[in-house]
Image (cartoon, helix red, strand yellow):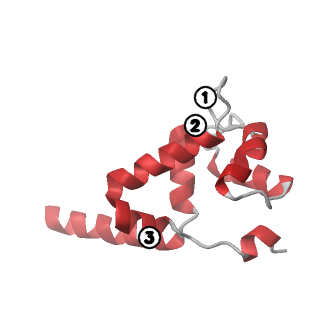
Amino acid sequence: MESKSESNFQDFLPLMAEKLGGDGLIGELCNGFQLLMDREKGVITFDSLKNNSALLGLQDLTDDDLWSMLRQGDFDGDGALNQMEFCVLMFRLSPELMEHSQFLLEEALQDLL
């Protein structure tokens, strides 16, 4: 079943990458992480995500959506997202950016060979 938030999702990461460049995009992702994280723990927890998601226009996400997002990005299994996990998750949630990243990686590898 598609949630309300998924049906209205528009991916702006490729546009941001184009306008800001790689370093600028990473900087903005880090700013987003700072907005969503629990200040005491230094990671994004379910509660910090729920409490701060409206700052990024994500107020329509359900608790299930939030838990799903945390689970998708939580590579070390600690129930929270550190900054690296958050940035990787944002890239993974952007199919167009992932496709472009794959192209750049393949191009770089060909240049090395």
* Marking on residue 42: 1
Mark 1 and mark 3 lie on one chain; the one further toward the N terminus is 3
Residue that numbered label 3 is attached to = 15
Report the amino acid beneath label 1.
Answer: Gly
Q: Residues within 10 Å of mark 1 (few under 14, many from 20)?
A: some
The residue closer to the viewer here, 26 or 92, is: 26
3D distance between C-alphas at marks 1 and 3: 28 Å
Total numbered badges shown on the rendered structure: 3
Could you tell me which quadrant the C terminus lies in? bottom left
Q: Nearer the viewer, residue 42 or 79?
A: 42
Q: Which mark is residue 82?
A: 2
Query: Disc 2 on helix, strand or loop?
Result: loop
The image position of residue 15, as x and y in percent, is 44, 70
Is residue 13 something one can see in this rendering?
yes
Percent of width and height locating residue 39: 65, 27
Q: Amino acid at mark 3?
A: Leu
Verify CB contact (< 8 Å) between mark 2 and mark 1: yes
2 relative position to 82: left or right: right
Q: Residues within 10 Å of mark 2 (few under 14, many from 20)?
A: many
Q: Is residue 20 left or right of residue 12?
A: left
What distance separates the C-alpha of mark 3 from that of mark 2? 25 Å
Q: Nearer the viewer, mark 2 or mark 1?
A: 1
Q: Residue at x 20, y 69 (%)?
A: 110
